[in-house]
Image (cartoon, grey):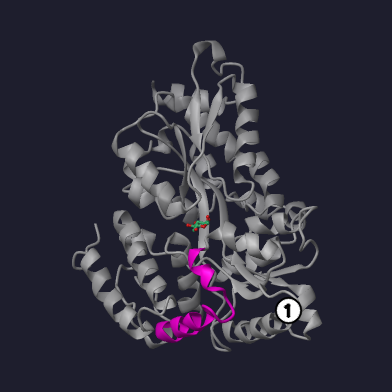
Amino acid sequence: MSISRKLLFTLGFACSFAPRAAEQKSISIACGAVGIEYELCKSASEAWSKTSGVPVKLVSTPNDTNQKLELFQQLLSAQSADIDVFMVDVVWPGILGQHFEDLSGYLPTAEKNAHFDNLIANDTVGGRWVALPWYVDTGVMYYRADLLKKYNLDVPQTWQELTSAAKKIQEGEKKTDSKFVGFVFQGKAYEGLTCNVLEWISSFGGTDFVDGSGKVLANNPKNIEALELAATWIGGIAPKGVLNYAEEEARGVFQSGGAAFMRNWPYAYTLLNSKNSPVLGKVGVMPTPKGGQDGRHTPVLGGWHLAVSKYSKHKPEAVSLIRYLASESVQRGRIQHGFFPTLKSLYADKKVLASSPLFGVLAKSLATAVARPSRATGAQYNRVSNEIWNTTFSILSGKEKAEDGLKALDKKLVRVSRGGKWN
Ligand code: GLC
């Protein structure tokens, strides 16, 4: 199909020339299922399906981002046509980009420019535009405002203050609830732990494990300081079980009223404040803390984008679907659920800004957020992250001292980098 024909089709995703179901085309989309992601993806995909006449099938995928990646890598390296549309983590374009269609052939430039430039840069690999930004998020810190008040504590601004506030609340609450804990986060050995540890080390003014130019520097006194503090949390203010927690396990504990603080992503906010939530109306939220008075708030940048498989048999229809999902009206509707837009226009709209109590926190967080080293490490990113989360996990579990672990991590990362060349 010529480029102009592709453009015509995708531009008219809701128009009359969209194919009818009679053509027996159908699109499979692999969405996430954390919180209410799946339901939101389903309802929006079905709305597209109604206007286009093309049936959509949702494929369920594992919750952990790296397990999802493994599955997608298997499907894509087998050139499977089973999934047409992939929801891709912001750190994956360098890993999976070669398997995705170049969207430049389908979408007008103005539509590309409507998204934040850094997101488009993130999704451009070797000159090919391989994914359409869908939503952004950053790590945020949730706290029980009612308990801070009960124990006469201010909202902690640093990790050290959080540690002592969590300890005080935990000691007090344990008297009536023996399972109560001070702090929950994502401590399992997976991508989420890489996000958490980057927030700790950067907030202390440490060095990113791999910097923007691809230089490895894991072993730094500030990184050691951050990890030594984090190691004290396990079995202290955090339960030992936190080493098995991903996002939803942490939310489960916090939402049932069992923890004073939780590091998570914005998606949790609406769920924590849903009608039957035991913590409804009791939760405050702030950017992740600083590493000491001289530290910085450095939440990690996350988010998910949409890509069309090169092996899809229905590419124009798949492009039409992702254009609809990433459109202004769908992005606007998702804000109330904590999925923040990638379109510049929505941030200029005062009504939109006022529509979510989280917007202010997100804006602050975005201003100082840190990115994972996926641009510099490209196709090797998952191996890099694997080394980072394994080392962090081993330090948190007390198997290794922070200094030794970080020293060894330096060597491992240099090895993965093939002498600093990365790709
Ligand atoms: C969130 C973020 C994503 C990150 C993941 C880690 O889904 O949006 O970027 O990789 O959490 O668990």
Q: Which residue is drawn at the image coordinates 65% and 58% (left, top)?
A: 268
Q: Amino acid at mark 1?
A: Glu
Q: Is residue 121 visible?
A: no
| Residue 38 to residue 212: above or below | above
Report the number of discs: 1
**Quarter the N terminus occupies:** top left
Is 152 within the magenta? no
State the extent of the magenta-drawn residues as a range: 223-244
Ligand 1 has an atom within 8 Å of the beta carbon of the residue at disc 1: no
Q: Which residue is drawn at the image coordinates 39% and 24% (left, top)?
A: 313
Q: Which residue is mark 1?
A: 173
- Name the spot of residue 271 as percent of width and height, x first: 70, 54
- Name the spot of residue 142 as percent of width and height, x first: 67, 69
Q: List the single residue furthest toward the top.
A: 22
- Name the spot of residue 304 as percent of width and height, x first: 51, 50
From the viewer's side, name the closer residue of 102 and 207: 207
Write down the quadrant of residue 80 in the picture: top left
| Residue 361 to residue 55: above or below | below
| Residue 28 to residue 129: above or below | above
